[in-house]
Amino acid sequence: MLAERRKLTTNPLTSTEGIALQVDDVYVPLGLVERKKQSKRQGDVSPEQGSELYKETEITKTFEHDAFLEEVLKQKNTPKSQGKRIAIIGEPGAGKTTLLQRIADWVSREINQSIVIWVSLADLREKELKSYLFETWLTQVAEKIGKAKATEQLKNDFVALFNQNNVWLLLDGLDEMSASNPLTEIARQFREAGLISQARIVLTCRVNLWDGSINALDDFDIYRSLDFSYPQQVERLIYKWFAANQEKGEQLCTALKESGKERIQDLVKNPLRLTLLCLNWQSGDGKLPDTQAGLYQQFVDDFYKWKKDEFATNSDQRQQLNVKLGELAKAAIDKEANRFRLRQDFVSQFLGNTDDEKSLLKLALNRGWLNCVGIDTNRKPVYAFFHTSFQEYFAAIAIDDWHFFLKHFPYNPSQGTYRIFEPQWKQTILLWLGREEKNLKQQKQQFIDALVCFQDGCGKWNRENVDKGFYEYRAYFVAAAGVAEFRDYLRSDGLIAQIVEWTIDSTNSINEEASSALQQTDRTKAIASLLQLLQSTDIPQFFTKAIASLLQLLQSTTVDDYTRWRAAASLGEIDPGNEIAIAALVKLLQSTNLDYFTYRQAASSLGEIDPGNKIAISTLVELLKSTTVDDYTRCQAANSLGKIDPGNEIAIAALVQLLQSTTVDDFTRWQAADSLEKIGTGNEIAIAALVQLLQSTTVDDFTRWQAADSLEKIDPGNEFAIAALVQLLQSTTVDDSTRWLAASSLGKIGTGNKFAIAALVKLLQSTNLDDYTRMQAASSLGEIGTGNENAISALVELLKSTTVDDYTRCQAANSLGKIDPGNEIAIAALVKLLQSTNLDYFTYRQAASSLGEIDPGNKIAISTLVELLKSTTVDDYTRCQAANSLWKIDPGNEIAIAALVQLLQSTTVDDSTRSQAAESLGEIIQNNQHRFAVVKALSGYWRLNDEYYNLAWKCAQNMPYPDFYKAWHQNNIATRALRSFAKILFTRII
């Protein structure tokens, strides 16, 4: 009888496509979490991660599928019922029924003498569970064994099975019972039908019912099914679904990975939604609907059809519910602090109360469009849409006028509406543009026209390659994304051509945004526009001339081989895969009279412009096998081969051979060690060769350092490498430069190694060490000596020294603060340095920066930096660095922001310092107040360099347009007068 229960609940939907699947056909094991109590919800989530809304926050344990079966069902290891009462809860389509089907199979197979009885609780109708079991179910059993009805003997045997604790009741769909409160009703039946209490019970229930009513099943252990992981489990199900057509499944997996599909990736972590996606891909013959709105509309239609008998609705109910869900969704995105976690009081304003059985809220919960995802601090329910993407879709279908997104008052933006610049509305805008209603076509045309023609009233920055205001660019980019959804836009070709032009010939910030917009717009038209640009005479002149000149050089019969190689390599760089360049390099490699240098360079270039090229690989291999080539060329050829064919054993062997050779000069041996570092990671032969080199008594110190450094990189933690570096530090004959390099390398690789720390400590204590190497030793100790008492003591002694220079003292204090956070001696030393009157500015700045890094929040550090900013004698660059450090140790410090803004506004500050101030502000501004001050300061510059422009662009990306407009015009009296005059003449444009 269990075999009849192996059909998927989605088969009624998929049967229209001739698909009727069994559980075993597509099953992907789901994990579960053991719930401790109902989750409390406060923060919000991003719409790209809408599935996080359903994540349990109050859990005891997480189980993989097999571990759940073994520990919970077989070993009975549960806190409340010792495995006798198990509830599996989740949102609609979370895979509860499918999981229960797998549990049925597993229990039948793995637990001796178990009798598994499956009951779909919707089938009870008006019957009670006990009556159903003894009348309906037992009669079906009798019929299976050739009896017309259950005999008394069969009934007695059935009772005996219960008394022997052999019966498992798998009760599916508690939420589908026809009772006003299924939880209370089933609890009563368990209690009054004493026989049933002997059975082990596993039931499934939607989270809405489990958390939304008085729960009388308090003796049940609660487990919630987890979502699929993306991409692993999602792709696994896709391949199972398309087992008969693997290519189509592969295409769907590839389509999901495309940029801009993040919402869909998250959406399909739910098994039902993934099934619906597969169904749409199947019915669309390997394509999804042309627009996102079309896809979501199909999802909505399919979702209403799913379990339509269990939760029946008519067309009027569905239409009325959709309208109200749209109003709720729109208001939540627009007004609620937590847009996707919806308070009960807020939801009730649109859908009524759950107490009313006829309310739209009750219908929304039954159908699963809304689900309870936890409680708030007042223990009231918190709801969420089935997925955030559906909330955005319902909001889109509730908007009937494009002015909801944009109502522009050019001379008084504070009176306008500018949702086009609010990130939370972008997806809803795209869904609105993709709606199929014919009566919206003219509106959509007008809306995109308004975006393309938007003027922000903030003037034009006097910069090359900048022809629009910041918000004009932003509106244009929204339009570019919009034409991918509304492909009937009459001027889309020109719009996309403009975006393409900005990707090539614009300032960096705009170039990046235009490139992003190009990924989001109509792909077919974008590619066509790019091809047209490449064939156009308007392509940048330098690009055309470069390609023409290089082609001419390659085709020349008189040019020398070296020049031919350089031409081919350059052409490959600006036009990767260029067949003429590849052919020219291949021809060079086939030449018999080519010098080794050009030979090797040609092979290397061929590998770079056409990775994996077999001719390049074979040529380099032959070069390595040659007995006439010099050692340096052999080394370079091996390095090139390692780059174009990573892990190539011949390349590694050639480099190892060079290391072991007794006739190779030190420079080539050093180069070979350096090359092994790049291509020999994890290779045992390479590691052994470097170890052997370290043990050699004839190699020079610099090569020994290079070998140790390379060895650590291809075999992290190698003790020979650390020992060799320590030996270099202790040597009395090694030169200062190599000793400094060894100290620097130990700072990167010797973390926690007591020998490395001891060697650096000893180096610090040396009396004949140059200041530069002592400073590097102190710096390295700061990287590897955390918590080491000897390292701490050595740095403290260094700080107390009266002979050490100030810069080394500063570095020692910085290192001490890293390995012993909060060390008062380090802080005091840095403060003392900052209070010094004869400190050079470079060390002064370094001390201020170090103080900010080693003790965030230190009051002495903060006050010292504040005083530094107030000083009238400190130079501007130091003031800039001090402000940056102050922000790091005291985020939100307004004096730091004010100081940097003041530097921007100053007329005496040099360009370098002003640029540094702009860069620092770009990193630390956090709120609208800061951005307002920055825009106000920048508005006085008619010509901006990259740092200023990028800072202003960053402000525009994160600032409401009316605020930016106000800041821009704050100090411009003439503009204010013009604006006042314009307000009299004009009312509203658009």
Image (spheres, grey):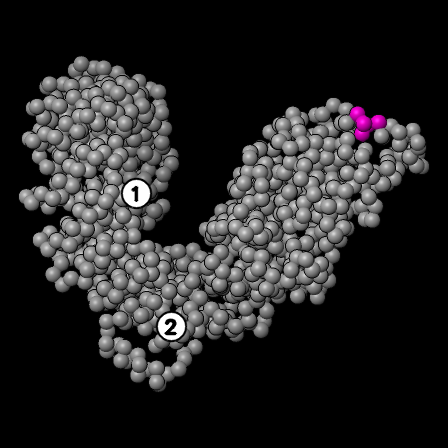
From the viewer's side, name the closer residue of 884 and 432.
884
Quarter of the picture holding the C terminus: bottom left
Q: Position of residue 349 (x, y in %)?
A: 59, 64
Residue type at numbered disc 1:
Ala
**Quadrant of res 772:** top left
Residue at the spot of label 1: 584
Instruction: Name the chief secondary structure element in magenta.
Output: helix
From the viewer's side, name the closer residue of 368 and 790.
790
Q: Residue at x 7, y 24 (%)?
A: 768
Q: Relative to 659, does residue 880 appear above or below in the rendering?
A: below
Q: Residue at x 73, y 46 (%)?
A: 184
Please state if 881 lies on the left or on the right of 59 as rendered: left
Mark identifier at residue 207: none
Q: Is residue 611 visible?
A: yes
Dot in front, 2 or 1:
2
**Quadrant of res 933:** bottom left
Q: Is residue 659 visible?
A: no
Identify the secondary structure beneath mark 2. helix
Q: Residues within 10 Å of mark 1 (few under 14, many from 20)?
A: some
Residue 245 inside the magenta-drawn segment: no
- In the displayed orientation, state which residue is furthest to the bottom: 985
- Marks 2 and 1 close (CB-CB < 8 Å): no
Q: CA distance from mark 2 to mark 1?
A: 63 Å
Q: Residue at x 27, y 72 (%)?
A: 969
Q: Over which residues does the magenta segment extend?
A: 160-164
Q: Relative to 647, does residue 36 appear above or below in the rendering?
A: below
Residue 162 inside the magenta-drawn segment: yes
Residue at the spot of label 2: 414
Q: Relative to 242, does residue 280 appear above or below in the rendering?
A: below
Residue type at numbered disc 2:
Ser
